[in-house]
Every structure is written in C-alpha cells, then in structure tokens.
Image (tube, rainbow, N blue to C red):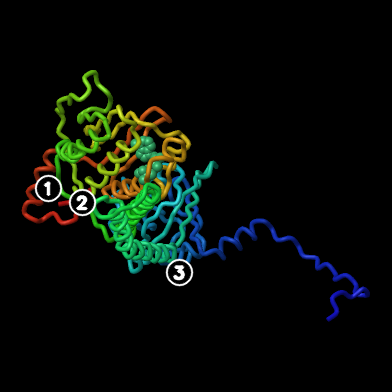
Amino acid sequence: MKLFNRNKQPAPVVQQNPAPQNLLAELALTSIHDGVIITNRAGLIQYANPAAITMLGFNTAQNVIGFDAGLLLKIESKEGRELPENENKILQAIRTGQPLESYEVCLLSGAAKKRIPISISLIPVNNSEGNRIITFRDITKELAEEGEQTEFISTASHEMRTPVASIEGYLSLALNPQTATIDERARTYLNSAHAASQHLGQLFRDLLDVTKLDDGRLHPHFQPVEMVGLIKQISDEYRVPINNAKLTYQFGSSEPNNTPGASRRIEQVVYGYVDVNLMREIMGNLIDNAIKYTPAGGSIYINVLGDGDRALINVTDTGIGISSDDLGHIFQKFYRADNSDTRTIGGTGLGLYLVKQRVEAMGGRVWAESGFGEGSTFFVSLPRITGEEYEKRMIAFNNGMLNNIPQGGTQ
Ligand code: ADP
C-alpha cells in the first residue's frame, strides 16, 4: 500500500465563509439533548431550544414563547409530590434571579401525560433584560443505573453479612481461653483478624442501611411527637456507653455549664412530625461519633430548642474536632478525616451520610460546626408544628388515619 505520494499536489484548501458565531451557537442549541430556555426578568420565555419544547410536551416554539416559565415548568418532587411554592426552588430562582445548581425534580410533560426525572439549573445573566438561562436534562438513564448499582450493593452486603458473622464467631471462639488454647503470638494475629472482621461486619450493616433509603425501600412513617421528650429519651439510653468511655453527659444544654453532670431544666415544648425510628438512627450515629471522637475526661451536651418554625437539635462534644478542610466533606459517602487522631479510631465513613439521608427524608437539614481540636457541634433542624397542629395530628394518628403523610401534607 502506498502511504505517501511524493508527486501528489497538496489538496486545494476549500475556501469556506466562516460560519457566523451565532449560527454555530444555534447549531449547538438545536442539536443537544438538554433543554435550554431563556427567560426575561419577569420569567417570560424568550427562547426555547427544540429539546426543551419536546420535554415540555409541545411541538412548536409558538406554544412556549411569551409564556411564563414558572407555569410551563410543571414540577413535582422526586417522590411524585406536588411542590408547594416555598419548596419549588426553580420557581424561586426564576423570581429572585438567584443562581440554582443542579436540582433534581420530576417534570410533568404534555398535560401531565408523562413524568420525566430531570436535573435542572438556572444561571442569571447580568444584562439589562435580566435574562435567566434555564437548562434541564433527562436523567432517567442515570437514575436507572444508580438503582441497579444500589440493588447490587444491597444484595452483595446482605449475602456477605452471613459469612462475615461466621468468621467473627469462630475468631471469638479461638480467642476465648475456655474454648481454645493458643499461644501469645497467635493471639495477637487473631485479635487483628477479629478487629478487621468486626469492621467488615459494620461496613455491611451500614451499607445495607444506606441502600434502604437510596433505593426507596425506606418510607418514613411520620407521627406527631414532642421533640424534647423524644430526644431526651433516646439520648438517655446512651448513658452507659458514655460513662464507659469516661465522658460526662448533659441533656438540655448546648455548652458546658458550671456544674458538670447537672441537667438544666428544659422549659420549652417543641412539637415535630417525624419518623421515630429514623430519629433513633440519626441520634445513635451522632452520639456514637461524639463518644468515639472525644477522649476520656470530655463531655457530651445534647439539647432541643424551638427555632421559629424549626426544631433545632444539637449534639455537642469537647472532642478532637474537625478541621475546616474536612468539614465540607464529612457528610459524603465513605469520607473519613485522615489525621493522627482519627487513624486509630475505627469507622466506615458512612454514619454521617446515613444521618444526612435520613434527616433530608424528613424535610430537615444537618450541618456541623467545629474546628480542629475545638470539639464539635452537629445540628439537626427539622420542621416544627404548632401545639394545635400536634393535637389535630395526634387524634388522626391515634385513629390510624395518619399514614405516611409527608412533611407539610394536609390533613
Ligand atoms: P465514621 O464511621 O468514620 O465515624 P462518619 O460518617 O460517622 O464515619 O463520620 C465521618 C468523619 O467525620 C469521621 O471519620 C470523622 O473524621 C468525622 N467526625 C464525625 N463525627 C465527629 C465528631 N463528633 N468529632 C470529630 N470528628 C467527627
């Protein structure tokens, strides 16, 4: 095969008029699968690309140009719940002109005949028109893949728990002087193997708990509760492990007071509408961490306060604290701060992810305030209900009429 022809004249350069920039931009916008809408300050649509028109359930641009984007973008929560205006972040972003980053919702397309899971974002333009550029992408495929992944992790964790429990059991027998005789060197090795198998067992348990919410198997069972009493009851159950770790515990305080060990009187009554089992898991993880990351001699303070329309819980410790670099990551899956203090403390990096998942499933928010070496406070903020609403929901609950009505649901 002739690879190179010396005699060949260079191919003539085809002179083309360079395409105007706006034609190229138009070409890109009409070819992509992402929907793009441009509105003016008032939220009226000035431009929609073909993908946007189709995803909104229309055929031509005339059906959408000049219309209010807030009205055409009919969205529901991912769980299929109609979003009230204060939860509809896209509507708020259109109105306020504040940027919105990748927000996952369900788009009701074509007179609600089709529901498309989308991720949507808004970029405000700083021009005289006050344009907002809204882009949205169909994420059906990504969600299906995520679902398969979650199912795989869940099945694998479930299957692997049994052999790990058996390994743990046999290692315990080998380490028990009443059931086995081993020399000191073997004991050292088996102790390490036992610690590793316990870690593995915890990892599978945590993974199973995490996947329960990820794949939608865990539906919160909301019930009206008095939050101070509930959180005190759950927290008091940790007195023994707290004492074993040589820590002091105080309920009803956000910070050390002068008389360690003495509980301040709680005067406030705070009503909430939560899933009690999820609250147990949330508090359990936060208190376990406070115990784990606080050296002996330290203290743990827990409190619940009414903060406007929110119930605010704090779990405060005087432990090793979290550096500002780590603080932004600790709620991510598998994230563990890596320093000389945490390296010797066992963990899977899933506890706080699990907490975040569960708090958000109840319409709440969790965050931490800390500094390295300064102790930590974890805050959980959940929707609060009035005493009157509590009474009403309590009657409905006792009559078995409250079944999974989400936060903010009407009775
Ligand atoms: P882990 O199993 O590692 O404890 P978590 O998800 O519960 O996983 O926590 C993530 C990381 O956040 C921990 O590895 C630790 O570095 C940090 N952390 C969590 N709680 C505390 C706390 N109370 N004090 C200091 N560091 C904490």
Amino acid found under the numbered disc labelled 2: Gly
Label drawn at residue 55: none
**CA gap, disc 2 and disc 1:** 11 Å
Circle 2 packing at 10 Å, graded few (<14), some (14-19), many (20+), is: few
Image spot of residue 292 (x, y percent): 33, 38
Residue drawn 41% across the image and 28% down it: 373
How crowded pointer 3 is (Cα within 10 Å; few <14, some 14-19, many 20+) is rated as: few
Residue visible at 36% across and 50% down? 183
Q: Secondary structure at mark 2?
A: loop
Task: Inspect the image, locate mark 3, and give the three-letter code of the amino acid beneath it.
Answer: Asn
Residue that appears at 17% across and 26% down: 263
Which is nearer the eye, 397 or 98? 397
Q: Is residue 299 above or below residue 16?
A: above
Residue labelled with disc 2: 409
Q: Which numbered disc flags the more N-terminal residue, 3 or 2?
A: 3
Judge left or right: residue 400 versus residue 50.
Answer: left
Residue tagged by mark 3? 59
Q: Is residue 331 visible?
A: yes
Of residue 321 and residue 183, the one placed in the foreground of this image is: 183
CB-based contact (under 8 Å), mark 3 and mark 1: no
Image-based side of 386 in relation to 109, left or right: left
Q: Hey, what amino acid is under mark 1?
A: Arg
State the image coordinates of residue 177 (x, y, percent, origin top left): 27, 50
Please, which residue is most extreme toward the bottom here? Answer: 1
Residue at 42 percent across and 44 percent down: it is 336
Few, some or many C-alpha atoms within 10 Å of disc 1 (few <14, some 14-19, many ≥20)?
Answer: many
Q: Mark 3 falls on what kind of element?
A: loop
Q: Answer with mark 3 or mark 1, whichever residue precedes in sequence.
A: 3
